[in-house]
Amino acid sequence: MIPRYSRPQMAAIWAPENRFRIWLDIEAHACDAQAELGVIPASAAQAVRERGAFEIERIDAIERDTHHDVIAFLTNLAEHVGPEARFVHQGMTSSDVLDTCLAVQLTQAADLLLADLDAVLGALKRRAVEHKYTPTIGRSHGIHAEPTTFGLKLAGHWAEFARDRDRLVAARKEVATCAISGAVGTFANIDPRVEAHVAAKLGLTPEPISTQVIPRDRHAQFFMTLALIAAGIERLATEIRHLQRTELREAEEYFAPGQKGSSAMPHKRNPVLSENLTGLARLIRSHVGPALENVALWHERDISHSSVERVIAPDATIALDFALARLAGLVDRLVVYPERMRQNLESLGGLADSQRLLLALTQAGMSREDAYRLVQKHAMAAWHGGTGFAERLKADPAITRYLSPAAIDGSFDTAYHLKHVDTIFRRVFGE
């Protein structure tokens, strides 16, 4: 991922230093287990622990000749360990190191992403409670529907990200697997107890059956989870972009002193953060297809998945880390205009209460078909201007036969729509 969308802590997970450090830990833990089993001398395991080291530049130089990254690493490691290095990597294959390392990196990334989600959830909950009773018009198909509250809008997004958090916890568990099973995964030249030891040291679970590689359905689930989180980011970003449109102006991104919206038009205040998040979400979701295609490898293994994962693992996690951090800040400083929300809510002169009139007429004895036809007729006329909705209803004897003018006026009440806000908040956030 380019530096513009990278945060240091997540980027460090995918840096060569961290990758080779994990490789060294895997080899050292395996040597410890092999020594305990009497397969290699204890002095060899001790030598790896005491003298094990590497240089990234040296590994790169060796790989230019070997065209094999794990062999290049082992060669550099041997230069530090000395003669005892002949006992390193006993019975293991490259995928044992690569796949186990990837599992560690993905769990490290997941832990950062979980913290990012917690920040988003915290900001959303705070703003939802703040605007729990801030009335606004709900829209379906982009058209005024019925009143809701801005707090309910945000609570819905909070609930989605809470589900995403649960999904990521499950995906982290799914991908946190270790394979030290040797060629084609049969443990022919290495004891399964070595795998169990390495897994325990690295906080992983032994893969029940590997085919020299860890099955890639685990990784596909991980990337699909990242994609779902990205979809939630885009849904919220899209909502903010719409609310910031000039015609609505109900909420907008914080506009800092000195910030510029356009090189040509000084008046512009654009939703650039939300638009940026929309683009990043598209990028993150694009990794799902390749991750799914990685599941079908040839026989016990091939490396068609390798090049894909070298790109999508760092790019998807780094981009999502950046996006979640940006989203948390956006929500935290989102500027909300309750008065503008009220103006928009009232702009159609009560049309948002058309269902209340429909129901009142049916409860008073009119057929639903007749009630719908009459209410719609007056709503459409009011939509195009002229006499207001309530006035038209009160002037129609076919309606006043069932509803008094006072009953009609009583049907226009925003508070009526908000009577279960507390119930919904309890369902979302708990007592």
Image (spheres, rainbow, N blue to C red):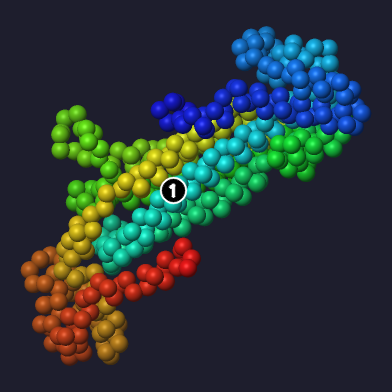
Against 190, is 63 above or below?
above
Binning the other alpha carbons within 10 Å of mark 1 as few (below 14), some (14 to 19) or many (20 upward) gives: many
Left or right relative to 148: residue 27: right
Residue extending furthest toward the front:
50
Q: Residue furthest right?
A: 38
SS class of the residue under badge 1? helix
Q: Which is nearer the eye, 364 or 372?
A: 364
Q: Is residue 79 left or right of residue 369?
A: right
Residue 224: give x, y in percent of width and height. Answer: 55, 44
Q: Which residue is mark 1?
A: 120
Q: Residue 40, relative to residue 254: is it above or below?
A: above
Q: Residue at x 51, y 32 (%)?
A: 9
Q: Position of residue 144 (x, y in %)?
A: 25, 62
- Kind of residue sitting beneath label 1: Val
Residue 243 in picture, x, y percent from top left = 27, 51
Task: Tell me where residue 168 appears, x and y as whole percent.
Answer: 57, 47
Q: Is any part of residue 211 visible from this angle?
A: no
Q: Is residue 245 visible?
A: yes
